[in-house]
């Protein structure tokens, strides 16, 4: 979900397309949508998503659980940072001096 939301922001608001999921997080960080700290926390999610979807490695349930817990832990921070960025973006696009 984090990567999908990020892709929508990049494509819709910033007119940026990426070829790989890891680039989604890199571009969100580069465009200051997410903080340095959050970027560091999320960096490996794109690669892990590819492992899950494409079955590059044997499925390790302990690793799946660890990434699942990590995603749950950082999701509230991701939501807060994206919400803050979206508020600023909408204000900028509407010309609001809020």
Image: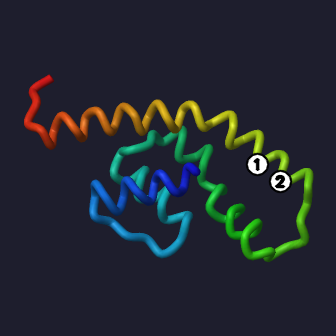
Q: Tags 1 and 2 in contact by the CB under 8 Å rule?
A: yes
Asked if 17 appears above or below 77 in the picture, the reply is below
Toward which corner of the image does residue 48 lie, by quadrant? Answer: bottom right
Mark-to-mark CA distance, 1 and 2: 5 Å
Mark 2 element type? helix
Residue marked by disc 1: 67
Residue shown at 91%/55% (left/top)? 61
Place of residue 5 in the rendered image (x, y in percent of width and height, measured from the top left): 48, 51
Toward which corner of the image does residue 58 lie, by quadrant? Answer: bottom right
**Looking at the rendered structure, which numbered label has been put on residue 47?**
none
Q: Nearer the viewer, residue 32 or 78?
A: 78
Mark 1 element type? helix
Place of residue 73 in the rendered image (x, y in percent of width and height, measured from the top left): 68, 34
Residue shown at 62%/36% (left/top)? 74
Asked if 24 appears above or below 56 in the picture, the reply is above
Is 10 left, or right, of 60 in this rendering? Answer: left
Asked if 47 appears above or below 41 in the picture, the reply is below
Is 8 left, or right, of 37 in this rendering? Answer: left
Label total for image: 2
**10 Å crowding of disc 1: few (<14), some (14-19), many (20+):** some
Residue marked by disc 2: 64
């Amino acid at each position: 979900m984090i990567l999908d939301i990020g892709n929508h922001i990049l494509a819709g608001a910033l007119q940026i397309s990426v070829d790989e999921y890891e680039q989604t997080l890199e571009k969100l960080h580069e465009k200051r949508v997410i903080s340095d700290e959050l970027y560091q926390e999320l960096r490996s999610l794109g690669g892990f998503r590819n492992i899950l979807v494409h079955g590059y490695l044997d499925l390790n349930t302990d690793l799946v659980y660890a990434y699942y817990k990590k995603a749950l832990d950082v999701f509230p921070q991701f939501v807060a940072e994206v919400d803050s960025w979206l508020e600023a973006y909408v204000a900028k696009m509407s010309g609001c001096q809020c």
